[in-house]
Image (spheres, helix red, strand yellow):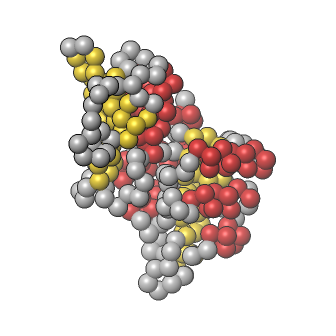
Amino acid sequence: MDMSIRVVVTGSKGRMGQEAVKMVMADPELELVAEVGSPRSGGEGASFSGVPFLTSLEEALLAYKPDVLVDLTTPHVVKSHMELAILHGVRPVVGTTGLSTEDIEELDKLCREKGVGAIIAPNFAIGAILMMKFAREAARYMPHVEIIELHHDKKLDAPSGTAVKTAELIQQTRQELKQGHPDEEEIIDGARGGYYHGFRIHSVRLPGLVAHQEVLFGHVGQTLSIRHDSMNRESFMPGINLGIKKVLKLDRLVYGLENVMD
């Protein structure tokens, strides 16, 4: 294991974090050196995986000297976690969404100053990356579009990071076009969804869902639907694994897994 990539997982108590812990432990090229999270019953000490469990990320970085930090926490703490990791020369691989454009720009600047790579991926599912790529291409020819994203009811941010990233990619190939009837009126506030450069994004939150998104395109006499469904959180693990291995070769922040897939 001398040549293995040393990994710390934050947010390991959550469902995504638990899957990430299992994925890291199953890969002989990776070594899980610690878990970090909010206090659990019994406090600090050994985690369920057998590695040390700490409530302080900085203590984990200092004590176990990881190469990579996998962050699967919440929008409220992810930026501070990334800053701390970068300052310690540890490369973050982040699946937590909710960072603003300004946050990402600041973190990229810090990465470049320190020569430390980082990856922020709104979605680590390979199929979701393909969905976003296909939507970007389709918008070139079918500019009338709406995004419907559906997630579990514990998700904190809306719209999802995947929906925002999809909208940004669509905007790269779609000329500005305000859709719908110019005199339309919302009888119930918000019924038409969030407005983004002329088209709409709709967020659904229900128990039983994991992560789902449909991009609907309309044209004269036809429609096109591009949909991706994650049935469980295991679907994100190949992407996280790829991110861990790719981030070691970076000296800047990369936003979107598609930028390291090729």
Q: Nearer the viewer, residue 16 or 19?
A: 16
In the image, taking residue 1 as reference, residue 17 lies left or right, namely left
Give the quadrant of residue 82: bottom right
Quadrant assignment for the N terminus:
bottom right
How many numbered marks appear?
Answer: 0
> In the image, residue 221 lies at what x, y percent?
20, 14
> In the image, residue 164 lies at what x, y percent?
45, 40
Relative to 73, say whether 115 is above or below. above
In the image, taking residue 109 as reference, residue 49 lies left or right, namely left
Quadrant assignment for the C terminus:
top right
Relative to 102, say whether 74 is above or below. below
Relative to 15, say whether 114 is above or below. above
Q: Is residue 250 visible?
A: yes
> In the image, residue 119 lies at what x, y percent?
59, 46
Q: Residue at x 38, y 62 (%)?
A: 15
Q: Residue at x 62, y 53 (%)?
A: 92
In the image, taking residue 144 as reference, residue 45 lies left or right, namely right
Q: Residue at x 42, y 54 (%)?
A: 157
Q: Residue at x 27, y 31 (%)?
A: 184
